[in-house]
């Protein structure tokens, strides 16, 4: 399906979502005013504003469930490939093309770097995301050289270091 077109399934899900929101808004704004009092063997029902009956609670629960399921579908259907295997395959092939283009660009950038930076950058390309301590082990470079080279790569905008616990995670930009 070309980008920008909405499938029937997505349109139906959007309608269910909107209907659920309308039902919830209506129920929350206009609760059924009934109060049930039990005194001994006597049951008294009276009108009291602001209370919900069991049927109100049931309708609200069904509306919440349908809203959450349809909302989740609308948010994630592109990510999980609900539209079918053709959509999934085209998305996977598009993603692999993008990844391959980035990998080629990163390989070209790696040729312009200094020795330690080049070694580290290639190790990061191979892993994608890697702990800084694992980089030290993988490359065999001293910790100080790794830190210095990562600082240089980070200042050029090629990588990003994120704090994770006691160490850093290194990823490509």
Image (tube, helix red, strand yellow):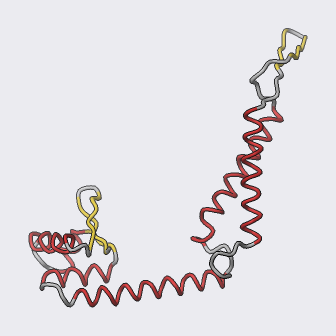
| Residue beneath the point at 83% across and 22% down | 34
On the image, which quarter does residue 39 sit in? top right
Residue 142 position, x and y percent, is 10, 74
- Quadrant in the picture for the N terminus: bottom right
Indicate whether 41 appears above or below 145: above
Residue 24 position, x and y percent, is 73, 42
Residue 87 lies left or right of residue 98; in this view the side is: right
| Residue beneath the point at 26% across and 75% down | 158
| Residue beneath the point at 77% across and 38% down | 26
On the image, which quarter does residue 169 sit in? bottom left
Residue 32 position, x and y percent, is 82, 28
Residue 155 position, x and y percent, is 19, 70
Q: Nearer the viewer, residue 144 or 150?
A: 150
Residue 163 lies left or right of residue 83; in this view the side is: left
Residue 68 lies left or right of residue 129; in this view the side is: right
Indicate whether 167 appears above or below 101: above
Indicate whether 139 appears above or below 30: below
- Quadrant in the picture for the C terminus: bottom left
On the image, which quarter does residue 23 sit in? top right
- Residue pushed farthest right? 42
Indicate whether 165 appears above or below 43: below
Q: Nearer the viewer, residue 12 or 117?
A: 12
- Residue pushed farthest front? 4
| Residue beneath the point at 72% across and 40% down | 25
Instruction: Count all numbered tags in the image, as a single digit.
Output: 0
């Amino acid at each position: 399906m070309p980008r920008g077109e909405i499938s029937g399934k997505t349109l139906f899900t959007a309608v269910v979502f909107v209907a659920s929101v309308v039902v919830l808004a209506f129920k929350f704004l206009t609760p059924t005013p009934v109060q049930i009092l039990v005194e001994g063997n006597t049951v008294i029902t009276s009108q009291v504003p602001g209370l919900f009956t069991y049927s109100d609670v049931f309708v609200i629960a069904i509306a919440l469930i349908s809203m959450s399921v349809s909302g989740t579908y609308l948010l994630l259907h592109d990510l999980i490939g609900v539209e079918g295997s053709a959509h999934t395959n085209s998305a996977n092939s598009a993603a692999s093309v993008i990844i391959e283009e980035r990998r080629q660009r990163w390989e070209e950038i790696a040729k312009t770097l200094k020795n330690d930076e080049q070694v580290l950058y290639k190790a990061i390309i191979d892993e994608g995301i890697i702990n800084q301590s694992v980089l030290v082990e993988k490359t065999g470079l001293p910790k100080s050289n790794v830190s210095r080279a990562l600082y240089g790569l980070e200042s050029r905008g090629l990588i990003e270091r994120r704090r994770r616990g006691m160490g850093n995670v290194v990823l490509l930009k």
